[in-house]
Amino acid sequence: MMDAVAQTRSGIQFIEQERAFDASPDGPEAELADRLVGRWYVELPRSSKTEILQVEELLVGTSLIDLNGEARRLLQASSADELAGASLARFVAMTSRPAMAELLEKARVGSVEVTHVCLLTTEGAPVGIRLLAARTGEGDDRLVLVGSESSLPDAALDELIKNEERYRRLFQRMPIALWRVDPRGVKPLLGDARDAGVTDLVAHFNRHPELLDLAMDSITIAEVNDLTVQLFGGRSGVDFIRPIRSYWTARPDTLRRVIGARYRGLPQYTEETQVCGIDGRVVDVVMSMAFPPPDDIDGDCLVGMIDITDRRQAEAQLRELQDEFAHAARISMLSELTASIAHELRQPLAAITTHGDATMRWLATEPPAVDRAVKGLEGILKATERASAIIQRIHRMAINEAAQCTSVDVNAAIADTALFVKHDLQSRQVALVLNLEDGLPPVFGDEVQLQQVIHNLIRNSAQAIAEGQCSRRCVTVSTARQGDHIEIVVEDTGPGIRPEQAGRLFTAFETTKRGGMGIGLTLCRSIVTSHGGTIEPDMSFCDGARFRIALPLQVSP
């Protein structure tokens, strides 16, 4: 009992001494006070209660108004403004919250108490504090907390040890590969970049590749878990404690983007990439990196990786199946276009025959009409080139080969497709209108596959118009640039899409056409999606059916 009274009297005397120091803020006593004790000025919530169940409400509602230099040092804060208005709950360890709440409540009613608590720094590190609280004289809701550094309370120390053990178990047993990365070595490089006014660090690395080499040698792995050792072929975690260069030799571009994301202040970055293991294997992974807060430039980064090798292999097999599926669809399409192909070839072949006969006649005259014969031969050459181009297009659609992605002129691809379907549309008495915006930039993809999409949509429209016996018989294909995409719109004057059909349009083997297989639209979506685009019906269109395709523009290397 006497100890408590002595503590209380000592606390009152201590606060009075602090107020005396405040009267001469420029004197040596004030500097000494700042070094020896921390002062936190807080404001309590208006409606706090004393029940233990309201501890969290009390601490969350108590806000920090100001603090002195020693208090900033204890909390590792760079300035008082950094913490102004922050909730007191942010800085009180769970084990000390009941004691802190009791301290605040007693101080508000005029009692001065001393207690031993565990506070948390801005970095989350625990600090033991011998603390007292009293009213400031500015109202019942304003208090000053005065304290100095001390050993951690036993309860806080036990909790700290338990938390560390929990972290160790969690880190090691997580079902993904985890790395704790120490990025402090790259700090001078990033500082130099900021001083030089660099805003795009990735572009800066592209211009100065030696800086990326320096970064790869400066960033080190501090710790890995057991699954990392297993996944990347090590014998123990010690094998991985080294600069990160050796892990990113297959994909240094990923590291360039990761450092760029950290430089921009992003909280995290995720990418599918490849990592080189200790045993030399290259592993396909999804990598996600969590960065420390922007004000914690020395904090560690946490990297998580999930092995997607099996998924990549399955995707490759799926692409092969899709290519075969697309090839079968193209062969089926060509069989339906036999009349159109014959019609397209008939014209250049007839021209060759006509020019050949004329040339023979001009050469048979006396004297031979050489000039006219040369013009006839030129006509033969032009007709031959046209026939060759038609056969080449047919060949490209017929052969079974993997997608050949190149720069594609969308308008030219559509115009080419229009030649194939012209005869088929004429036989159905359906007009084709092309509204193609001039000067469109290219997209990156496989031209034959994209033509297959356009052909499927045009053919579907023509069949719907014919089967619906519509009076207006027109299919319109339009192109336009929309931001960073090219939009292709195919619309018709047919019977349209019923609302109950909308959800099943792209379902395989679902069809409303007589004799249809139900694979056309499914294939269209597969092709467009593989090109990074989208294809959707426009259900707001009431005068027929309309489909919108969006394809991303080709990205410059």
Image (cartoon, helix red, strand yellow):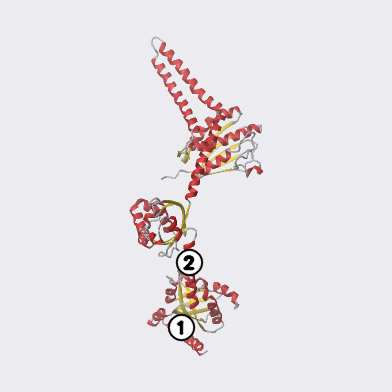
Looking at marks 2 and 1 on the same chain, the residue that comes earlier in the sequence is marked by 1
Q: Nearer the viewer, residue 503 or 494?
A: 503
Q: Nearer the viewer, residue 6 or 154?
A: 154
Contact, CB < 8 Å: mark 2 with mark 1? Answer: no
Numbered mark located on residue 167 in the image: 2
Q: Which residue is denoted by mark 1 in the rendering? A: 19
SS for callout 2: helix
Image spot of residue 19 (x, y percent): 46, 83
Q: Residue furthest bottom?
A: 2
- Pair 2/1: label in front: 2
Decide: is 286 above or below 517: below
Q: Residue furthest front?
A: 235
Image spot of residue 366 (x, y percent): 39, 9
Q: Amino acid at mark 1?
A: Arg
Q: Amino acid at mark 2?
A: Tyr
Image spot of residue 493 (x, y percent): 62, 35
Image spot of residue 464 (x, y percent): 63, 34
User: Dot 2: within a 10 Å radius of its alpha carbon, few (fewer than 14), some, or many (20 or more) residues?
Assistant: few
User: Dot 1: within a 10 Å radius of its alpha carbon, few (fewer than 14), some, or many (20 or more) residues?
Assistant: few
- Label 2 and label 1: CA atoms lie apart by 44 Å
Q: Nearer the viewer, residue 466 or 328?
A: 328
Which residue is depicted at the point 43% across and 16% down? 359
Decide: is 375 above or below 447: above
**Left or right position of 198 against 332:** left
